[in-house]
Amino acid sequence: MKYGIALFPSKPLQDQANSFRMRYDTHYAQIPPHITLKDPFELEEDQLPQLLKSLKEIAKNADPAYIKVYKVDSFYPQSNTIFFKIQEHESLTYLYKALHQDSEETKPYSFVPHLTIGQDLSEDEHADIVGRLKMKEFEHEETIDRMQLLYQLENGSWTVYETFRLGKEA
């Protein structure tokens, strides 16, 4: 089965992201706005208990994740993905590194904390939308105290398998 690990921001930030996603993101109906901590990966059912144990330990040792959205950006020319850029913070970096420490996979890109608001756009659409959105101010700060293990359904959508509270009090 295919799994992934993400953070879901507050409803106000999700609502703001969705105001763009419903127009510009082909994955709008498949998953709510989120910050990906670990890209989708395959896992056999008998490996799940060990993953859950590991995620509980990582969550217990992590601080709640502080996020600060400060602008719109794009991964162009690698892809036409448009996103709310999130300032790097040690709480996010810790989670990302902890979730990848045992991984043998090679990441093609470094960790760029972000919340996707558009993808799979044509070159012209992408250039037009990024140009307009970069002229606007976007600022939002919050602390997220939960991390989610997600799994992919047969229809391609994602749903939460388990939620892990971040921090010593979890």
Image: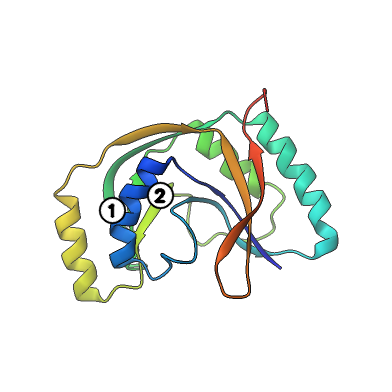
What residue is pinned by disc 2?
Answer: 114
> How many residues crowd around disc 1 within 10 Å: few (fewer than 14), some, or many (20 or more)?
some
- Residue 11 vs residue 49, the one in the foreground: 11
Q: What residue did someone put label 1 on?
A: 73
Amino acid beneath label 1: Asp
Image x and y of residue 92, in percent: 51, 38
Query: Marks 2 and 1, Cα distance to the nearest angstrom?
Result: 9 Å
Residue at 71% across / 68% down in the picture? Answer: 1
User: Horizontal and vertical percent for residue 16?
Assistant: 31, 48
The residue lying at 76 percent from left, 43 percent from top is: 54
Q: Amino acid at mark 2?
A: His
Rendered location of residue 150, percent (x, y): 62, 56
Image check: 75 left or right of 110? left
Residue 61: which quarter of the image? top right
Can residue 57 be seen in the rendering of this structure?
yes
Please give left or right for residue 115 compared with residue 65 in the image. left
